Image: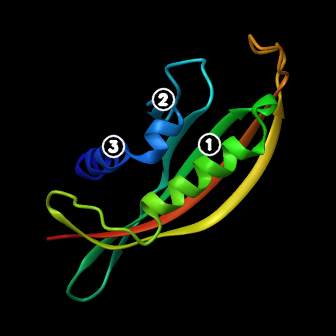
């Protein structure tokens, strides 16, 4: 899984999405209180076997965060750049072959904060985007 995460991190670096969030892309939890930002996590990674091959079917969740005061254009830009970066795109993973990488689901939500952000915003836009990624060991 380390090789997959390394490849994914490389894919994020210097992308349009990376620029959208000023480099604030994190694995599992954010290290910064600033918005906008992206947090991605592996939700599941079961192994699947055929008679001759073994695959890992990864469910990747990418959460896009933006202050509600920034408006939906920030979210739609991040979302479009994320999809352009990952959906049905190549990914070079040391020791593995990418079989597929496809967007599976989008769940847009709004969160109400218990304390306002520095700009006075009390709400966050949060879009959860799921990708199914299938890899096989080479």
Local secondary structure at mark 2: loop
> In x, y percent, where is residue 98?
29, 70
Query: N-terminal of the two: label 3 or label 1?
Result: 3
Q: Which quarter of the figure has residue 18?
A: top left
Local secondary structure at mark 1: strand
In-image side of 98 versus 73 (left or right): left
Q: Is residue 26 above or below residue 11?
A: above
Label at residue 22? 2
Work out whether residue 91 or residue 48 is closer to the camera in this orientation and state it: 91
Distance from Cα at disc 3 to Cα at disc 1? 16 Å
Query: N-terminal of the two: label 2 or label 1?
Result: 2
Work out whether residue 16 or residue 42 is closer to the camera in this orientation and state it: 16
Mark 2 or mark 1, which is nearer to you? Answer: 2
Q: Is residue 83 above or below residue 52?
A: above
Local crowd at mark 2 within 10 Å, few (<14), some, or many (≥20)?
A: some
- Residue in view at x 52 percent, y 53 percent: 81
> In x, y percent, where is residue 113?
82, 23
- Residue in view at x 28 percent, y 45 percent: 10
Exactly how many numbered labels are in the figure? 3
Distance from Cα at disc 2 to Cα at disc 3? 15 Å
> In x, y percent, where is residue 61?
55, 52
Distance from Cα at disc 2 to Cα at disc 1? 13 Å
- Residue in view at x 71 percent, y 41 percent: 126
Local crowd at mark 1 within 10 Å, few (<14), some, or many (≥20)?
A: many
In-image side of 10 versus 116 (left or right): left
Colour scheme in use: rainbow
Query: N-terminal of the two: label 2 or label 3?
Result: 3
Where is mark 3, residue-wise? Answer: 9
- Residue in view at x 74 percent, y 10 percent: 118
Q: Is residue 67 above or below residue 48?
A: above
Where is mark 1, residue-wise? Answer: 64
Local secondary structure at mark 3: helix
């Amino acid at each position: 899984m380390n090789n997959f995460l390394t490849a994914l991190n490389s894919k994020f670096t210097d992308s349009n999405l990376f620029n959208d969030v000023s480099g604030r892309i994190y694995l599992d939890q954010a290290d910064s209180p600033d918005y906008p930002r992206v947090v991605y996590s592996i939700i599941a990674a079961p192994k699947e076997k055929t008679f001759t091959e073994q695959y890992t079917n990864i469910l990747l969740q990418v959460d896009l965060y933006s202050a509600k005061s920034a408006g939906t254009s920030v979210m739609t830009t991040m979302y479009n750049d994320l999809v352009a970066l990952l959906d049905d795109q190549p990914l070079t993973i040391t020791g593995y072959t990418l079989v597929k990488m496809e967007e599976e689901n989008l769940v847009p939500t709004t969160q109400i904060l218990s304390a306002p952000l520095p700009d006075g915003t009390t709400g966050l836009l949060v879009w959860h985007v799921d990708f199914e990624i299938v890899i096989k060991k080479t």
